[in-house]
Amino acid sequence: MPDKKIFVYRLEKLAADPDREDLDGLQLRKWKPGITRYIPPNSPVTYLYLWLMHVLKIFKNKEYSAYSIEEDGREVCSLVCVPALYKWPFMNRDDLQIKNVFTHPEHRGKGYASRLIRYTLDKTAFNGRIYWYMTDEENIPSQKLCEKLGFKFVGRYRRKRNKYLVYEGEIIQGR
């Protein structure tokens, strides 16, 4: 299996958006882990390890959560916020990673993902917090989405035997 290359993006300040779409009429939900809630919406069973990290207090902050948009009682878009973790040494204590952004195929192209990310950033923002967004090299729609929202490309990682190794970009020097 070839190395999986991961693009890393950073957002230090949410840019103003004059064309910002309204969230009126959308049902927004926040998910928090609990004793019976261990896998966020639209996430694979492998996310069980994140629940375990939360329970064991391995994350550097307590903000492991997920946000979703529902329409007619069905989740059409979701994402997960993951706090800093040992395998991402460039993240500070209060940083969050936006992860597992998913839009149901029937609802793609309607702006749900960008609205949900902006909503999440608004709800979790405070002075000094930095957001990270990581996506596979071949996921062009995801890259365009995060760039549209103001995230800046800072480097690449490659995954090799479940280890992430920096090989390009300013992230090599850290922050």
Image: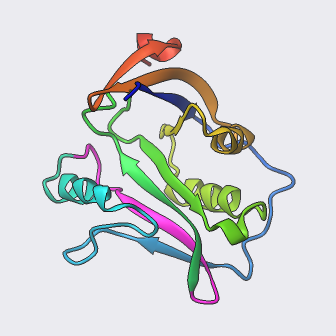
Q: Quadrant of the N terminus?
A: top left
Residue 121 place in picture, x, y as percent? 57, 53
Q: Closer to the camera, 37 or 63?
A: 37
Q: Residue most toward the front?
A: 1
Q: From what the image shows, is residue 161 above or below residue 166?
A: below
**What is the count of numbered marks?**
0
Residue placed farthest to the right in the image? 19
Name the residue located 54 percent from the left edge and 70 percent from the top edge: 68
- Which residue is painted at 74% across and 42% down in the image? 148
Query: Does 72 appear above or below 20?
Result: below
Quadrant location, the C terminus:
top left
Residue 111 falls in image quadrant: bottom right
Q: In front here: 8 or 17?
A: 8
User: Relative to residue 123, is residue 26 drawn left or right?
Assistant: right
Question: Which residue is the extreme one toward the left?
Answer: 56
Q: Quadrant of residue 24?
A: bottom right
Give the percent coordinates (x, y) of residue 39. Answer: 32, 67
Asked if residue 170 is among those painted magenta in the image, a careful observer would answer no
In the image, taking residue 31 as reference, residue 74 lies left or right, namely right
Residue 98 placement, left or right of 106: left
Residue 72 vertical placement versus 141 (above, below): below
Along the line of sight, the residue nearer the viewer: 93 or 135 = 135
Placement of 117 over or under 158, stated as above or below: below
Residue at 41% x, 62% y: name it: 43
Please indicate whether residue 46 sits to the left or right of residue 108 in the image: left
Q: Which residues are magenta?
A: 59-73
Scheme of colours in the image: rainbow
Q: Position of residue 86 (x, y in %)?
A: 24, 33
- Residue 119 lies, in percent from the top left, at 62, 61
Decide whether residue 60 is among the magenta residues.
Answer: yes
